[in-house]
Image (spheres, rainbow, N blue to C red):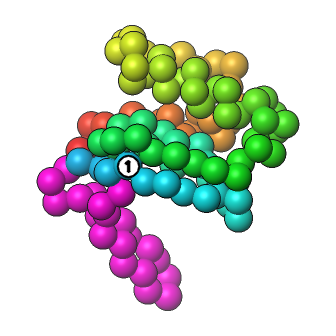
């Protein structure tokens, strides 16, 4: 996505792109399907079209997380509705925290 990542024994640091614009990526998330929500929330504000694959098991978690992420992205980004994370009352916690992250990223970039 254009970020710079550094890692040492005790931490991982991710710095956003110098130009402030995340770039689209393709990600096979089969080895870490529970992380797809955070990736999807960030991809929603990236330039271009991103794609996530191998996350079918996310349809049978606390809710259909794939459908909820699509719906949430349309609420926050596509339709430009003024909203907040607290409006997401029916989503599971992992969904809520992913959108919380993205709302904060929008203000930092």
Residue at 30% x, 69% y is: 4
Residue at 76% x, 30% y is: 64
Query: What segment is highlighted magenta in the picture?
Result: 1-20
Q: Nearer the viewer, residue 20 or 98?
A: 20
As drawn, the residue found furthest toward the left would be 19
State the image coordinates of residue 78 (x, y, percent, origin top left). 40, 20
Q: Nearer the viewer, residue 66 or 5?
A: 66
Instruction: Name the residue tied to disc 1.
Output: 24
Q: Is 42 left or right of 22, judged from the image as shown?
A: right
Residue 23 seen: yes
Query: For residue 102, which quarter of the picture?
Result: top left
State the image coordinates of residue 63 (x, y, percent, origin top left). 78, 29
As drawn, the residue found furthest toward the bottom would be 9
Q: Is 5 left or right of 34, judged from the image as shown?
A: left
Q: Is residue 34 above or below residue 49?
A: below
Magenta stretch encompasses residue 6 = yes
Residue at 48% x, 39% y is: 41
Magenta stretch encompasses residue 34 = no
Dot 1 falls on a residue whose secondary structure is loop
Q: What secondary structure do most residues of the magenta stretch adopt?
A: loop
- Local packing at callout 1 (Cα closer than 10 Å; few below 14, some 14-19, many 20+) is some
Q: Is residue 6 above or below residue 9?
A: above
Q: Is 15 left or right of 99, judged from the image as shown?
A: left
């Amino acid at each position: 996505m254009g970020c710079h990542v550094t890692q040492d024994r005790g931490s991982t640091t991710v710095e956003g792109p110098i130009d402030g614009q995340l770039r689209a990526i393709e990600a096979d998330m089969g080895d870490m399907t529970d992380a797809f929500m955070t990736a999807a929330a960030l991809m929603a504000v990236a330039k271009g079209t991103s794609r996530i694959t191998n996350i079918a098991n996310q349809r049978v978690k606390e809710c259909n997380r794939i459908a909820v992420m699509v719906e949430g992205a349309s609420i926050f980004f596509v339709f430009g509705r003024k909203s907040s994370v607290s409006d997401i009352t029916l989503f599971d916690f992992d969904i809520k925290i992913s959108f919380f992250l993205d709302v904060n990223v929008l203000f930092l970039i």
